[in-house]
Image: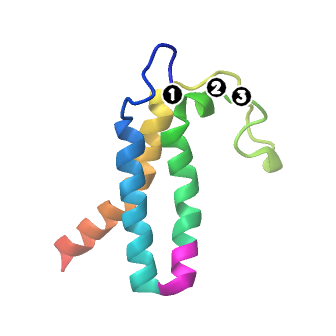
Amino acid sequence: MRVGESPTTIDWNRTLSLLLALAYLIAAGILGGGGFFFRTLAFLVLPMACIWYGEAMGDITGPGTSFLSGGPAITDASPGCMVKAAGWLVLSLPLVIMFILWVQS
């Protein structure tokens, strides 16, 4: 929440992403059982974090994304809106895949 923002203000990014994540989890539980439910839950962690905490995650700098293989250091902050957009991209991938499979059938 930003300074001066009302605590009752609806954050549509959070609300819509939560609804979509719950729909994924319900579908995974019904269609795939417990194992698929927990794999879906694990998949949702990163995109949900990017959407909900994009500004804070964009400020993270450090050794890079691949510190085990000596990846390049992240020296500048990323814009929070881009982190949120990347989160939405990853979160929407299952819908895109389902649409493509539906069109092909």
Quadrant of the rendered image containing residue 101: bottom left
Q: Which region of the structure is painted magenta?
A: 33-38
Front tag of 1 and 3: 1
In the figure, 1 relative to 52: above or below? above
Q: Position of residue 61 (x, y in %)?
A: 71, 28
What is the crowding at mark 3: few (fewer than 14 residues within 10 Å), some, or many (at least 20)? some
- For disc 3, the marked residue is 61
Q: Are marks 2 and 3 in contact (CB under 8 Å)?
A: yes
Q: Residue at x 36, y 65 (%)?
A: 23
Q: Which SS does the magenta portion mostly show?
A: helix
- Viewer-nearest residue: 78 or 37: 37
- In the image, is residue 62 above or below residue 77? below
Question: Circle 2 — which element?
Answer: loop
As drawn, the label of residue 96 is none
Residue 39 lies in quadrant: bottom right
The image position of residue 13, as x and y in percent, is 38, 40
Q: Circle 1 is placed at which residue position?
A: 80
Helix, strand or loop for disc 1:
helix
Mark 1: amino acid? Gly
Residue behind mark 2:
59
Q: Residue at x 52, y 76 (%)?
A: 37
Closest to the observer, 18 or 79: 18
